[in-house]
Image (cartoon, rainbow, N blue to C red):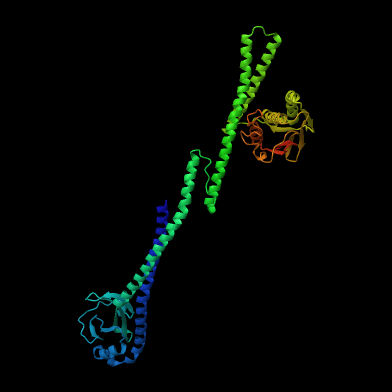
Amino acid sequence: MTRRVIFSFMSVILLVLVLTEGIFFVVIHRYYYNGITDTLLSHVETSSAFFTKYEGEQLRDIPEKSHEIIKSFAYPGTELELVNRKGEVLISSTGFDVDETIDLKSSILKGDTASEVEKTSTGEKILAVYSPLKYNEQTIAVLRYKSTLEEVDRAIRQIMTFVTFIGLGVAVLVFLISLRLSHSIVRPIKEITSASSRMAQGHFSTRMNEGYKHELGELSRTLNYMADEIKKTDKMKSDFISSISHEIRTPLTGIKGWIETMKADDSLTRQELDQGFQIISSETDRLIVLLEELLDFSHFQSNRMKLHRSPTRLDRLIEHTIIQSSSKAEKAGVTLQVTHLIDKDILIDGNRMKQVLVNLVDNAIKYSSVHSTITVRMKEHSDSIEIEVKDDGMGISKEQLPLIKNTFYQVNVEQSGSGIGLSIANEIIELHGGRIEIESVEGSGTSVFIFLPLK
């Protein structure tokens, strides 16, 4: 990881350095070469304008005037040659005879100036500038200025060597910075990866450093939060397994006990047998309800729960729920009360909605004190129907209230129940497009509100 980060940084920096130095070389090269060319061309233009004083019959014989022309048009630091139209060098400012024939371009013979980078017979690199001499609009000879480029190239090489060393220094500096930067990036990633790997192995007590900046810090906080939630879920699952085991074992123990008793004791009276059958039937119903809850939970977890909607009278569902729960309420010493029922059809799954109401009323009975009252009422809004189930029981603490709808969560693990009833009820209401809200004050009771959309 560190190598990849450094390689990425260095690749980008080296590419930028190479491009920058390449552009700089081209600019410096053109600057020097074009500077010499522009200077000579400027001199040539001035010289050509000055050449008009030689107009006359005497200039018909260029060879006789060659010395004067060379003397007049010479430029310091350059060699000047006078070349005829055939490309033969007539005279040079060096004073030596030049046995050379130059291939003049047609554009030069037509009167255009030109510059070329050339090499001499000795291999020396020069800049040659050609300037035609005209008489009566015709080119009668060509001035050829030659300037050596050895010194210029040497200066360019020195500059580029200096720039290259600067580039190498920058590359080394960038390497050191990228090395430090890569460690600052890779180290927390490695730590987060290592910690998340331990979490994946089930060590949810592992915690990550949340002091990292920006996205890494946010990632660390998210993973820590995830670990906390998984620990809570695991604890709730453990409590659920413990609770469900107890819930299943208790009725099974009662059923088996009575079966063994009825098998072993032939002296049981009819009344005792009826009592045993009633207990077996009651405990069997209890097991059926528990298994139905588990089956519903399985359906919700796999998204296989389907609603079968039809126009349904909510007030009648509430009345049936109260009648069904009245026996349980009477045994608990609790009074069930219904107020403000609204005669209105609403498109819902009646069986599922009754399951929700039964669960809420049963919970209210379970956590209510003796001689208290449970009230169920309805209220119509512009876009929804509200159902409230209110009890005067033990209530729920502020810490527990946000968790009450979580799967497997129980306010009191010592109470009977699986901890999934309210979670299933919440899922059913959400499938209907509604919501459940819970208000509670510890020691003063709880109100559960169901909001169902009218459309």
User: Residue shown at 28%/88% (left/top)?
Assistant: 70
Q: Nearer the viewer, residue 430 or 213?
A: 213
Relative depth, front residue between 32 and 318: 318
Give the image location of residue 227, x and y in percent: 55, 41
Left or right of 298 on screen, residue 126: left
406 or 383, which lies in front?
406
Residue 176 in sight here: yes
The relative height of residue 84 versus residue 449 in the rendered view (above or below) is below
Q: Tell me, yes or no, if residue 291 can be seen here.
A: no
Query: Quarter of the image holding residue 283?
Result: top right
Question: Is residue 123 placed above or below 214 in the rendered structure?
Answer: below
Give the image location of residue 137, x and y in percent: 33, 85
Q: Is residue 322 left or right of residue 232?
A: right
Q: Position of residue 167 (x, y in %)?
A: 38, 66
Quadrant in which the C terminus appears? top right
Res 270 quadrant in image = top right
Rendered position, 342 above or below 16: above
Q: Write the residue at 40% across / 60% down.
A: 175
Quadrant in the rendering for residue 435: top right
- Across and down, in percent, residue 258 comes to 64, 14
